[in-house]
Image: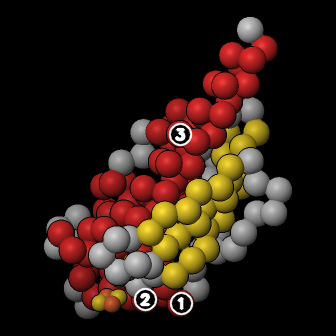
Amino acid sequence: SSNADIYHEMIVDYSRNPINYGTIEDHDVTFHDSNPLCGDSIDIDMKIDENKVTDIKFHGKGCAICMACSSVLTEITKGKSLEDVRKIEKNDVLSELGLEHLQAVRIKCALLSLKVLKSALYTYIGKHLENTEDVD
Ligand code: FES
Ligand code: FES
C-alpha cells in the first residue's frame, strides 16, 4: 500500500488510541484553546522540572487529525527542555503523519494542539519570570 494509506492508518489508530491522553492533577501549567472553525477544543497539562517537561497529557474533543497530531506532539514534547519545546515547529508534527500539504481548513485541526502547547509554554515562562522579578 502507498505511503498515503500508511499515514491514514496511523491517523485512524492514533485517534482511536490517543497517546498521552488524560489529565495531570498536580500540573505546573495547563492551557485550553479551541479551533474557531469547528468549536473543538484541547487542554494540555504539563509537569515541568528543572526547565524540562517531565510529563505532558492532553484531553478534549477533536477530529481524527486533531487527535493524531496531539498524540504526536505530546510524544515529541515529553522529556524536552523548555528551550527545545520553544523550537518545535509545525512541520515537526505534520511530517510525522504525512500532513505537510494539508488544505488550509484542516491545518487548524492539525495545529490546534501546537497552539495550545506554545501558549502553555509562554504562560509558564511568564509566571516564572514574574516570580524571579519578585525575588530581585
Ligand atoms: Fe483520514 Fe478521516 S482520518 S480522512
Ligand atoms: Fe474540529 Fe478538526 S474538525 S478539530
Neighbor class of circle 2 (other Cα within 10 Å; few <14, some 14-19, many 20+) is: some
Q: Earlier in the sequence, mark 3 or mark 1?
A: 1
- 129 relative to 96 in the view: left or right: right
Q: Amino acid at mark 1?
A: Arg
Residue 84 numbered mark, or none:
none
Q: Secondary structure at mark 2?
A: helix
Distance between mark 1 and mark 2 Cα atoms? 6 Å
* Pointer 1 residue: 16
Please give the count of numbered marks on the rendered protein. 3
Cα–Cα span, label 2 and label 3: 31 Å
Q: Name the residue furthest right.
A: 26
Residue 57 placement (x, y as % from top left): 65, 65
Q: Quadrant of ligand 2?
A: bottom left
Asked if the residue at label 1 sits under 8 Å from ligand 1, the reply is: no
Task: Tell me if mark 1 has few (under 14), some (14-19) or many (20+) residues whose alpha carbon lies within 10 angstroms of its own.
Answer: few
Say whether residue 81 is visible. no
Q: Quadrant of the C terminus?
A: top right
Name the residue type under label 3.
Answer: Tyr
Q: Earlier in the sequence, mark 2 or mark 3?
A: 2
For the N terminus, which image quadrant? bottom left
**Colouring style:** secondary structure
Q: Residues within 10 Å of mark 3 (few under 14, many from 20)?
A: some
Would residue 24 be seen by someone viewing this image from the given angle? yes
Do tag 1 and tag 2 residues touch (Cβ < 8 Å)? yes
**Residue 122, disc:** 3
